[in-house]
């Protein structure tokens, strides 16, 4: 007897009572109301910038899973669940054969596709709708869909930043001054001090430090400098030394933190395309290198020592080149948890929405690259398995990998990721990364 037939039986015993309907409604929508209430609390306690970053990251996670969902459905696979979060269920609703919902632990999301490997038992009638039954290119499209979405988002965010806000370029500053005089250098022997500004070389005016360096003669040459100090113009004579990195260049022995200015330069739509690709490539390269360094034996060892020993607080500073707003100055591979990312994103948003665009672009690239690490349960693990099965299949015979042999490695990866997550959360609360003021 079908459910519809049971519901229309004379006894009516199978019909839900009004109390049951009320209880189901409360269970269904109570969790959603709780989630909305938590977002409202975030707004009240931490302000609008934090709420914007939270919603942006939720949207980013949702789009990642939507990529898997759409490609799986397009391939004819059966998707039974689409959830944001893990752990206890807060809210869910069924539409067709898929249950959509929210769970209590905001540490990611997942889409459940039947028959992801040879260990899962599936009714024979549904075998043709499993992930494992589909052609190689269909399985690959599902496996890489999440990272592809992140990369597309990053490209869109970088392009938007360039078009709306322009790109940041370093230009020589006319309002510069000496901040360091190298001991034993020609500048020290001539009596130059921090705060001085050189305005002429051999009676030729120079507006910037770059201009000054360009007109310096060869080493061993005597020069006369016009020096501005506290509103007074002084004359200083000295003999140039040799540059430590190029003996053919004259060397004063000074440095200046104010010699260059970062300013926005307007970028047109056509010009923004190659600029976007260049910056995207830079972020991908840096993400690959940082992940490789972190998950090396020395990187993991250093991370867990930091968790145990609580080193001095690190400060992040602007990166050299590229649009990246900030990177760790002393430890470029410091892992930031979701909570640390939210705080940094909120701080950046307070200084302008352009900074948020760049932060989200960097976050999308990093997550996209991270998901392609070739181990289960990450997406890259499914890419490796699908490719291995394709290489082992020939002459019309389909080879299926035994995932049971990979389970110990998968558990080891999960264990490492759990410890890294806990450690990064601990560091973000006890020794948070601070943006330069």
Image (cartoon, rainbow, N blue to C red):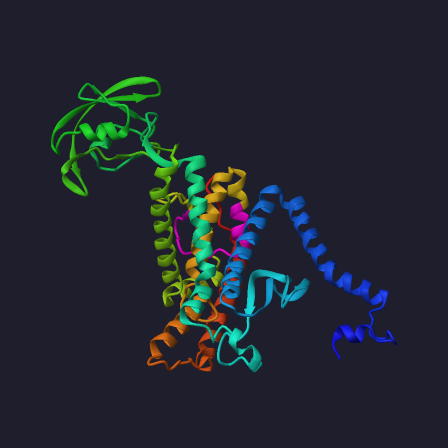
Q: Does the magenta stretch include residue 409?
A: no
Up the image or down, 38 lies above or below 348; here it is below
Q: Residue at 34% x, 54% y: name it.
A: 285
Q: Which of 75 and 412 is in front in this view?
A: 75
Q: Nearer the viewer, residue 137 or 174?
A: 137
Up the image or down, 127 lies above or below 252; here it is below
Q: Quadrant of residue 19?
A: bottom right
Number of numbered discs overlaid on the protein picture: 0
Up the image or down, 201 lies above or below 136; here it is above
Q: Quadrant of residue 218?
A: top left
Q: Residue at 12% x, 29% y: name it.
A: 221
From the viewer's perspective, is 311 left or right of 78? left
> Do we see residue 258 in this rendering?
yes
Residue 266 position in % (x across, y down): 39, 32
Residue 264 position in % (x across, y down): 40, 33
* Magenta residues, start to end: 327-345
Residue 435 position in % (x across, y down): 47, 44
Q: Is residue 336 magenta?
A: yes
Q: Nearer the viewer, residue 212 or 65?
A: 65
From the viewer's perspective, is 221 left or right of 54? left
Q: Residue at 48% x, 50% y: name it.
A: 433
Q: Residue at 37% x, 68% y: name it.
A: 297
> Do we see residue 306 in this rendering?
no
From the viewer's perspective, is 342 left or right of 139? right
The quadrant the N terminus occupies is bottom right
Residue 141 position in % (x across, y down): 44, 64
From the viewer's perspective, is 365 left or right of 351? left
């Amino acid at each position: 007897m079908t459910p519809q037939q049971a519901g229309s039986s004379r006894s009516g015993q199978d019909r839900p009572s009004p109390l049951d309907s009320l209880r189901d409604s409360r269970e269904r929508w109570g969790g959603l109301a709780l989630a909305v209430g938590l977002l409202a609390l975030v707004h009240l306690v931490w302000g609008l910038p934090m709420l914007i970053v939270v919603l942006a990251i939720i949207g980013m996670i949702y789009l990642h899973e939507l990529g898997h969902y759409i490609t799986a459905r397009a391939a004819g696979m059966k998707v039974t669940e689409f959830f944001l979060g893990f752990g206890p269920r807060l809210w869910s609703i069924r539409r067709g054969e898929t249950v959509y919902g929210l769970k209590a632990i905001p540490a990611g999301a997942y889409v459940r596709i039947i028959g992801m490997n040879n260990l899962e038992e599936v009714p024979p009638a549904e075998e043709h709708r499993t992930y494992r039954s589909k052609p190689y290119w269909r399985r690959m499209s599902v496996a890489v869909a999440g990272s592809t979405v992140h990369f597309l988002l990053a490209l869109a965010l970088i392009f938007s930043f360039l078009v709306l806000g322009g790109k940041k370029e370093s230009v020589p500053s006319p309002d510069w001054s000496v901040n360091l005089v190298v001991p034993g250098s020609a500048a020290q022997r001539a009596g130059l001090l921090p705060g001085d500004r050189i305005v002429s070389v051999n009676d030729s005016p120079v507006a910037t430090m770059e201009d000054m360096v360009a007109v310096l003669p060869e080493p061993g040459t005597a020069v006369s400098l016009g020096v501005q100090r506290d509103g007074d113009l002084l004359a200083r004579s000295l003999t140039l030394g040799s540059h430590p990195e190029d003996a053919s260049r004259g060397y004063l022995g000074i440095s200046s933190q104010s010699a260059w200015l970062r300013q926005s330069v307007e970028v047109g739509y056509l010009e923004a395309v190659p600029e976007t690709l260049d910056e995207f490539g830079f972020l991908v390269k840096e993400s690959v290198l940082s992940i490789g360094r972190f998950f090396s034996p020395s990187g993991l060892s250093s991370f867990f020592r930091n968790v145990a020993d609580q080193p001095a607080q690190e400060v992040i500073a602007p990166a050299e080149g590229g649009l990246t707003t900030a990177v760790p100055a002393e430890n470029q591979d410091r892992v930031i948890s979701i909570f640390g990312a939210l705080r940094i994103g909120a701080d950046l948003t307070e200084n302008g929405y352009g900074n948020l665009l760049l932060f989200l672009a960097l976050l999308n690239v990093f997550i996209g690259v991270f998901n392609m690490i070739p181990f289960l349960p990450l997406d890259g693990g499914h890419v490796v398995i699908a490719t291995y099965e394709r290489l082992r299949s020939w002459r019309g015979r389909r080879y299926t990998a035994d995932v049971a042999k990979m389970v110990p490695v998968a558990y080891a990866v999960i264990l490492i990721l759990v410890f890294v997550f806990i450690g990064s959360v601990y560091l973000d609360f006890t020794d948070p990364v601070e943006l330069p003021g």
